[in-house]
Each structure stands twice: as C-alpha cells, then as structure tokens.
Image (tube, rainbow, N blue to C red):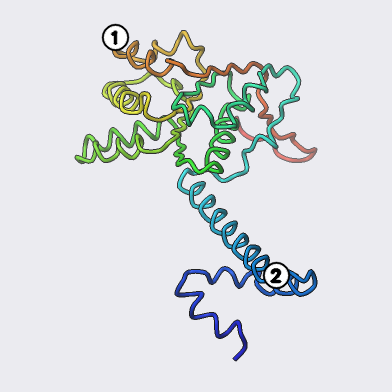
C-alpha cells in the first residue's frame, strides 16, 4: 500500500479527498523546486481552498439561475447606436451597491442588453460571495399569487426577501393586476434598505407608477424602489436579428 492509499481514509474523513486531484503534481513540483515541507503544505492547502471556493461559486450560480454565459466580457459595448454609460456599469460590477443595499434600475428598449447586464452583475455578485436570485418579474408575481392560494405566501415572500441581491427582469411589461400590485409592494417594502434589487424594464422611469391600478400604492412602491437607486438608461437598436433565409429554404411563417 503506497502513501496515498494510506492517507485516503483520513482525507475522506476530513473531507479533503479533493486534495488528491493535484497532490501528485504538487509532490513532483516540491521535489523539482526543492520546496520545504511548509511550502509544500501551503500549496496543497491553497489548491484545496480554491477548489472549495469554486464549488461554492458553482452552487451560488445554480441557485441564482445564472449560467455564466452572460458576462461583461462578452457584452457588446461597441454596438453601433448603443448609448450606455459603460463606466457606470463597471462601477456597479464591483458590487458595492450590494454592500450598501441600494437598488439598480435599468431601462431601455427591447433587445439592447438589459437582462444581459443584470445577469452579468449578478454573476459578479456570486463571485463576491453574495446570495443572488434571478427570475422574470412575471414568475415572481406568479409565485406570490400561488402562495396566496395555497397558504404559503409568507414562505414564498421570505424566499424572495432573503437573497442579498434579487434580479427581476421585465418589470412593467404588462400592467399589474390586483393583487399583484400588493404582492410587489410587500416585496419592495420587506427588502427596503435591507437588501438590493436589480429591475429591468422597457418603461421610462416616469411611467413606472402607471403600471399600478392603485395610484397611491404605486407611488409608495416606486418611491422606495428609486430611493438612492442607481439608474441606468440604455438607448439603441435591438441586438436581436432574425436569421437570414438561405436560398431554396422555406420562408418561416409569420
């Protein structure tokens, strides 16, 4: 039985079996570079720490419904006709607004990259160790509405209140019907100054209150949302383009 085989039960007991992934390489490195025992141990522990942090990141992203493909690195800031304060976006990507429990409100026409930027910032927040939840605004309201029906409203509301950062896409795509306006007010009220939100919307900021059937409730909700919020305005043409029809292929139905 070699040394690794002898260590295996202890490594499993200590939940350090991941050390084996790089142990052979690090042992060879220690010999070639004549590392001291402490230097060798430091490298092995560093590998294990990095492995665990990466695992935590993967779990946070999975829980947040962030797949990692929408990042700032692959966002097209140089698209023709796009008007966007890129410095503001990179400042937000530091996630200081999450630490300060501020909101981010992103508005712009369809297809200019609002959801992409929101998810990219959420990705950075996951990397910083924050708990993030991302979903469509419609899905959030559907969940809370279902909670009213089956008696789980408080639990569902807490699940949306708990994350450090809640990302809701496509606010105001449709007018709010009662009781969704009350549900959204409850959500905003419970998160107010306690945790951050990112909302994306096609509506200009002055029109947000018009989404609510109850004007007073709408004013109270929007007032809390925009208090100390970072406002991001994007102008430009949609990035989405239909596929070209190849010669001889059938024209898709409208």
* Location of residue 229 in the rendering, given as x and y in whole percent from the top left corner: 48, 18
Residue found 23% across the figure and 41% down from its top: 152
Query: Of discs 1 and 2, which sits in the foreground?
Result: 2
User: Disc count in the image?
Assistant: 2
Q: Badge 2, how many Cα within 10 Å: few under 14, some, many 20+?
A: few
What residue lies at 36% left-to-right and 36% top-to-bottom?
A: 160
* Residue 108, numbered label: none
Residue 48 spot, x, y in % from top left: 58, 62
Question: In the rendered view, does 245 fall on the left or right side of 113?
Answer: right
Task: Identify the residue shown where x is 34% and y is 15%.
Answer: 212
Q: Nearer the viewer, residue 203 or 96?
A: 96
User: Which callout, 1 or 2, points at the residue further toward the start of the chain?
Assistant: 2
100 and 56: which is toward the camera: 100
**Image quadrant assignment for residue 197:** top left
Query: Which quadrant does the N terminus fall into?
Result: bottom right
Image check: 193 left or right of 10?
left
Q: Which residue is mark 1?
A: 216
- At mark 1, the secondary structure is helix
- Residue at figure coordinates x 63%, y 70% from the top left: 21
Distance from label 1 to label 2 (Cα)? 70 Å
Q: Is residue 23 above or below residue 51?
A: below
Question: Which residue is under mark 2?
Answer: 36
| 139 left or right, relative to 43 | left
Assess whether mark 2 and mark 1 are in contact (beta carbons under 8 angstroms).
no
Residue 14: give x, y in percent of width and height. Answer: 46, 71
Q: Nearer the viewer, residue 56 or 207?
A: 56
């Amino acid at each position: 039985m070699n040394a690794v085989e002898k260590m295996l039960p202890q490594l499993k007991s200590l939940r350090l079996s991941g050390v084996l992934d790089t142990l052979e390489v690090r042992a060879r490195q220690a010999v070639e570079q004549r590392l001291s025992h402490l230097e060798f141990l430091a490298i092995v522990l560093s590998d294990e720490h990095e492995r665990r942090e990466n695992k935590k990141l993967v779990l946070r992203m999975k829980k947040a419904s962030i797949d990692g493909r929408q990042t700032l690195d692959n966002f097209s800031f140089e698209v023709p006709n796009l008007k966007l304060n890129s410095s503001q976006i990179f400042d937000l990507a530091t996630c200081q607004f999450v630490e300060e429990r501020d909101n981010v409100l992103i508005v712009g026409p369809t297809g200019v990259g609002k959801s992409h930027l929101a998810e990219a910032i959420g990705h950075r927040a996951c990397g910083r160790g924050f708990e993030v939840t991302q979903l469509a605004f419609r899905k959030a309201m559907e969940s809370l509405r279902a909670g009213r029906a089956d008696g789980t409203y408080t639990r569902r509301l807490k699940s949306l209140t708990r994350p450090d950062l809640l990302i809701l896409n496509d606010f105001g795509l449709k007018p709010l019907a009662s009781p969704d306006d009350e549900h959204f007010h409850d959500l905003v009220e419970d998160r107010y100054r306690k945790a951050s939100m990112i909302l994306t919307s096609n509506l200009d900021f002055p029109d947000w209150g018009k989404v609510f059937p109850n004007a007073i409730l709408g004013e109270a909700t929007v007032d809390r949302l925009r208090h100390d919020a970072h406002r991001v305005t994007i102008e430009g043409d949609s990035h989405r383009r239909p596929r070209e029809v190849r010669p001889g292929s059938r024209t898709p139905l409208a």
